[in-house]
Amino acid sequence: MIRINLLPIKQLKKLIQARSEVLGLVVLVAVILLGIAMVALAQSAKVSNLQTTNSELTKKRQSYQSILNEIAKLQKDKENLVTKLEMIGKLKKGSQVTVRVLDDLANLTPTNRLWLNSLDQKPGSLLISGIALDNSTIAQFMKSLDESPYFTSPKLSRSSLTEVGGRKLKQFSLTCGITGIEG
């Protein structure tokens, strides 16, 4: 007797295999979605933590802002004081130079042959105007200035004849450099 199996076994096997593949695919998609959800939750927690830290740091910075402003103000005050101290030092040095220049000039001036009318001190130079008995007195005065440690390169700017008290005298102007004096 021949037996004929009318049950669709091959089709049932294919159907079972298709169901298992679909079930595996669904499980795989569920695992992937679960992994994505976990990563998203971790990132969300990290962002929340960073936002909290950022707000705390912002509050701390605001609490320190008054101190930072005070430090900036103190730095500006320090710069101003340093500038003032430098200026005082320059003025002190300049006043010492002026005193020494005038003292040496007084010592170099022949009192009975030459008289000074005006002095004009500028940084590094001195303009001297006066009256002398003759040209040789002016030349001797210029030589004395040149030999002085406080004056350099005396140059006669002008010399002319003038009458003072009925006598003919030489009116002159000369310029010379002033050396920087330390101390």
Image: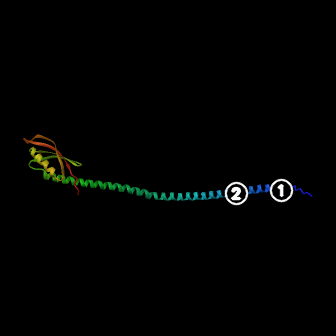
* Closer mark to the observer between disc 1 and disc 2: 1
Task: Residue 4: name its quadrant.
Answer: bottom right
Judged from the image, the secondary structure of the residue bearing numbered disc 2 is helix
Picture coordinates of residue 175, whole percent (x, y): 18, 45
Residue visible at 27% across and 54% down in the picture: 90
Q: Coloured how? A: rainbow
Indicate left or right for 182 with 171 as reference: right
The amino acid pointed to by label 1 is Ile
The residue under label 2 is 28
Q: Residues within 10 Å of mark 1 (few under 14, many from 20)?
A: few
- Looking at the image, which is closer to me, 14 or 154? 14
Q: Residue furthest toward the right?
A: 1
- Is residue 160 depicted above or below 152 in this figure? above
Picture coordinates of residue 42, whole percent (x, y): 61, 59
Q: Residues within 10 Å of mark 2 (few under 14, many from 20)?
A: few
- Looking at the image, which is closer to me, 68 or 134? 134
Residue visible at 16% across and 50% down in the picture: 146
Residue visible at 77% across and 56% down in the picture: 17
Picture coordinates of residue 140, whole percent (x, y): 11, 48
- Looking at the image, which is closer to me, 167 or 39? 39
Q: Quadrant of the N terminus?
A: bottom right
Picture coordinates of residue 6, whole percent (x, y): 87, 55
The amino acid pointed to by label 2 is Leu
First of labels 1, 2 by sequence position: 1
The residue under label 1 is 9
Judged from the image, the secondary structure of the residue bearing numbered disc 1 is helix
